[in-house]
Image (cartoon, helix red, strand yellow):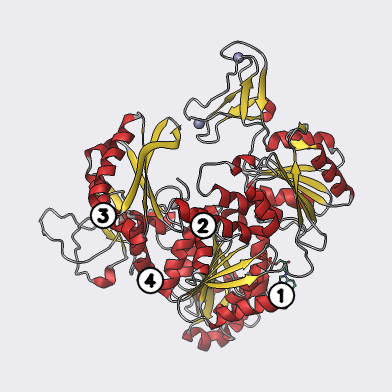
Amino acid sequence: MPLPLPRLFDYRATAPTGPQDIGRRVRVPFGPRELVGVVASTDAPQDDSPELREILDWLDDGPLLSGELLASLRWLARYTHAPLGEVLATALPAALRRGEPVPDTHAWAWRLTEAGATGLAGLRNGSKPRRLASVLQAGERDEDGLDDALDDWRAAARALLKRGYAERIAVPASQLVPAPLAGPVPNQEQQAAIIALREAVGFAPMLLDGVTGSGKTEVYLHAIADCLARGKQALVLVPEIGLTPQLLQRFRTRLGVPIHVSHSGLNDGERARTWAAAWRGEARVIVGTRSAVFTPLPDGGLVVVDEEHDGSYKQQDGIRYHARDFALVRGKALGIPVLLGSATPSLETLHNAASARYGYLRLSQRAGDARPPAVRVVDVRKRPLDAGLSAQMRDAIRSALDAGGQVLVFKNRRGYAPVLLCHDCGWSAQCPRCDSPMTVHAHGRRLQCHHCGHRKPSPPACPDCASLALQPQGNGTERIEAMLAEQFTDVPVLRIDRGSTQRKDALETLLGELGASPGILVGTQMLAKGHDLPNLTLVCVVGIDEGLFSADFRSHEKLAQLLIQVAGRAGRAQRAGEVLLQTHHPEHPLLATLIEGGYHAFAEAELPLREAAGFPPFAHLALLRAEAKHADPPMAFLQAARRAVHDASDRVDINGPMPAPMPRRAGMHRAQLALSAATRRDLHHALDHAVPALHALPESRKVRWSLDVDPLDL
Ligand code: ADP
Ligand code: ZN
Ligand code: ZN
């Protein structure tokens, strides 16, 4: 059942059942309601009490979840220590979870019946039915084909149907796609990677480590083509922002098969259709974001995870799975290669490659003629700044524009300014529901909380001292955009962040309008990947200094990845690119290492620090979170949880309970308990024993709690 309860529920079936029924959906009574569940077992319940309620309805003729996928999902439930019912519900598209039928993925075609084949001559010569019958005599035709062949064929088809001369049949959806175009000839490194994948036997996890623009996508395309040639399905996972029309277009023109997509921009029906097409084995290439990792693959032959380091692969509520990690589990169960691609692999993946658990494929050069960008640090200590940009930065923008190039200004904070401050008394605008300042928007007119969404107009005067000296402090993308628009009046200035691109396709439209002409893009990390910008010659990075000193153990890794990814946007085509990094800490070791040695030098320096501090990939973490309207219940629950974990194992370090990094959010008081173990086994052994005890704790009823195995941060 799709419920957060750690157990299965027994129902009586009205007809005999067996293992073949496992994975079928049923509609069952649950309290006063009806719910859709999935059959997990057909064993007789331990106590066959007569009160068992009856299954109301079997929704499908056969199982929706079976074989490898069902087995992998059972594994996921054990690994996340989450109820199986919730995991299975998470894996199904919303429409199927609600009990809707598996959607049609068929097209319709017409063919002559035997009576039609013999009776054809009896139809009046030159009549529409006769002409349609003659067309069908050559073989069945799908309706799209008939639209092209014959005007007004539908009336004729009805006439033939009525006489029993023709029938309408379901056929696989049109496989008509343009003939595949050839791509560039792979270079030596690409060729080596393609061959390694071609020759892989069984489960073969491989890291494709290649700088931005080195031709990783080309390797994916060849590997997918090989997979198709073996008659197998390929699943490609991409980060939320990576799934651009450009990427899909490239897949469509190169592979010669329909590309099925799955992402959050689709409606429930569209997502269910992609799922169903894969389930029936009709979809041969599926490209999707995080939840596409649950796509059924009856003929699975390859899984690709693009930008494997990307944080959007981790589900942050409900069942907290990591799509990359689950892709590896599925690859193992299917016995197939799993290709993890990135210019900035996660330290976990690099560690696995270094210890030979994963194969290692390297693309060290940019493909084609593109050269790597030159990176320069701009020291802004004691320099005057305008909306956070130094004069040197603004001069560089001018030169790049004058040379006909495009400029990207990266600032990872949207809005106008992060804080509204009273210059006279020091008051600042705080969110009433969160422990966080409210961000200033709309040039100072509006305040908005980026954590709970709370909005209100800016106060006309300081609520504490009535002073009118309220000043937005710091800079967000809106303020930088305003400054640039004022100073660079001859070119368009486009802002790209979650605020400006809420509408579907807004980003593509904005960038499409800009084309290749000179202009400035201002934006957050949404700009770090996705859409190709061949005319981009200058990347300006401002306001990264907070990331240098964050307490989060992954903050340096995230910052390094972001800097490399943003820098990688420059100079992707013939034009050389330049990256300017503005900071108050030009000597910070992270920046020095990154600039001198690149991402790998950073990773080599960072891994020993992680090991010394007992963080992943050298330790295994779980985070127990709790929240409630009042401050005490979460702490009380976590204290009890601490004892439960302690009783379960002495091989787990327990840290806390302590307040969450943001102790109050959307009106809820939040606390957490961090668990850490030297081995995955030790961690799971403790959780196996402790989690059932947590469900039974009386304190658990006064809080909302959740367990996050392998949390991205603490
Ligand atoms: P990545 O996925 O690593 O960013 P892409 O596969 O998108 O790299 O390649 C970057 C650009 O280089 C694309 O325009 C692509 O067509 C081109 N490219 C890739 N491989 C080659 C090659 N072997 N020869 C010439 N151009 C190539
Ligand atoms: Zn004041
Ligand atoms: Zn808030």
Earlier in the chain: of badge 1 and badge 2, it is: 1
Instruction: Give the residue type that dot 2 points to.
Output: Pro
Give the percent coordinates (x, y) of residue 538.
79, 51
Give the percent coordinates (x, y) of residue 57.
27, 59
Q: Callout 2 environment at 10 Å: few (<14), some (14 to 19), or many (20+)?
A: few
Image quadrant holding the N terminus, namely: bottom left
Secondary structure under tag 2 reads: helix
Dot 2 and dot 4 residues touching (CB under 8 Å) = no
The nearer-to-camera label among 3 and 4 is 4
Name the residue beneath numbered marker 2. 608
Name the residue beneath numbered marker 3. 28
Could you give the CA–CA distance between mark 2 and mark 4, rounded to whole angstroms?
A: 37 Å
The nearer-to-camera label among 2 and 4 is 2
Specify whether 445 is left or right of 173: right
Earlier in the chain: of badge 1 and badge 3, it is: 3
Earlier in the chain: of badge 2 and badge 3, it is: 3
Could you give the CA–CA distance between mark 1 and mark 4, rounded to whole angstroms?
A: 34 Å
Earlier in the chain: of badge 1 and badge 4, it is: 4
- Who's the residue at 61% across and 78% down the image? 194
Instruction: Give the residue type that dot 3 points to.
Output: Val
Name the residue beneath numbered marker 4. 68
